[in-house]
Amino acid sequence: MSPVLRRLIAPAVLGAALMSVPAIVSAHRGWLLPSGTVFSGTDGWVTVDAAVSNDLFFFDHQPMRIEAVKVWQPDGSDGQLQNGATGRYRSTFDVKLDKPGTWKIGSAQNAVMGSFKADGVEKRIGRRGPPRPGEGAPLTVADIPANATDVKLTEVSGRNEIFVTAGEPTTKVFATTGKGLEFAPVTHPDELVAGQPARFRFLIDGKPAAGLKATVIPGGKRYRDAEGAQELVAGPDGIVTVNWPAAGMYWLNATATDAKPTTPRATERRMSYTTTLEVLTP
Amino acid sequence: MRPSLVLLAGAVAAPATAGTVTVTIPRLDVAEYHRPYVAIWLEPAGGGAARTLGVWYDVKKGGNEPGTKWLADLRAWWRKGGRSMAMPADGISGATRAPGQYRIPLPADLKPGAYVLNVEAARETGGRELVSVPLTVPNPTARAAGKAELGAVAVAAR
């Protein structure tokens, strides 16, 4: 990668999720890696690595910022993120799993990117890449003047979440809002077993995300030659079926684009959903 | 073993007593040995709810990291129903066992039919193994053996 590109994407708050930068950047993957997904009892803690990198799950590029990471307890109420720290290559934090059931940990981003012309000069909305020295805050939709022409706006949204379970799995944290791209698993994400296909439904605005594209990549990239990615497409029911060749941690990223943004004057909407899944041996 | 109970069940239930499972924990020549966690359970052959016959874990260990913390390492059992049980479980759970042979009675109220008996062992700083063997009730007989963490697993009608 060229130094220029590297600088462009350097802070990559949630590089892959933001997807607001040129296509090549989508190769940078944001991920949350839990120390485990299946826990016994309610004395346990999960510790999570959060980073942005190409190779999964190696922290060798940028840490994921954890200010926006939230915790949902099994009953859907807010939980507590503890011991958060951000290093050069990764962030870490802990969550005490003191209630039985399935917990959700993750973040969501929403942004509007685009451009407009005012008095013959083209200006950009939102920032692609990191803030540069001497540069002010990026323009927002509110900065578009009344006489602007050629307004082109794209709504960009992304979620990056993981699920961990203490005791018996529950499903309350999968409750959907009916807004944007959402994960509505048929197979519980903490009950994945090598050799047993898993089915995950994706919804867009509460309706099955037919034709949605998903990529599933196993971790441990450094120790094999092939990327090993599975490129999958959701059926009419919005369901993606994933076969697990072996036990391990997998990164799943689903993306969809449509012309139904909720932001006024925006013409396009780009959505992504990312999760890390643990597959156990039978 | 509660011989009186088995005798009683045998006397009352005319067709059959359920039988006995014998589980062998092998002696292993390793530098650091810890007794394995073991779960023994039955599943109907056609699928259905698992019935746990025995769970051996570090019952006494409490504190920050109680013995129950590692029950999920018996991952097949955990998924099949261990995670929904409260521990300790009366008549089911017990302390880890030293290498040797152990006899576990099959419940006398088992309905006739085809089952799969599962024995899973997971050892700290060691391996994990699952041995599954089909059997039928009444008059179950079955035999299987593990390769690493478990020795012979046998089922006899009495």
Image (tube, coloured by chain):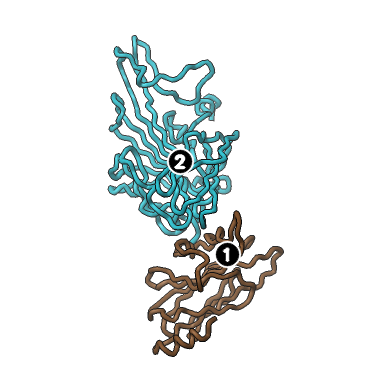
Q: CA distance from mark 1 to mark 2?
A: 32 Å
Q: Chain of mark 1?
A: B
Instruction: Measuring from the top left, give residue A276's x and y in whole percent.
Output: 47, 46
Instruction: Measuring from the top left, give residue B55's x and y in whole percent.
Output: 53, 69
Residue at numbered disc 2: A106
Q: Quadrant of residue A63?
A: top right
Tell me what hue chain A is rendered in.
cyan
How many numbered circles does the render carry? 2
Relative side of B64 to A172, left or right: right
Can I make out residue A246 in this image?
no
Q: Chain of mark 2?
A: A
Relative side of B9 to B26, left or right: left
Q: Looking at the image, which residue is at 52% across and 29% down?
A: A11
Q: Nearer the viewer, residue A167 or A227?
A: A167
B75 vs A229: above or below: below
Disc 1 packing (10 Å; few <14; some 14–19; many ≥20): many
Tell me what hue chain B is rendered in.
brown
Task: Name which residue type carries label 1.
Answer: Ala
Q: Looking at the image, which residue is at 54% across and 44% down?
A: A94
Q: Are marks 1 and 2 in contact (CB under 8 Å)?
A: no
Q: Nearer the viewer, residue A189 or B7?
A: B7
Secondary element type, mark 1: strand
Residue at numbered disc 1: B122
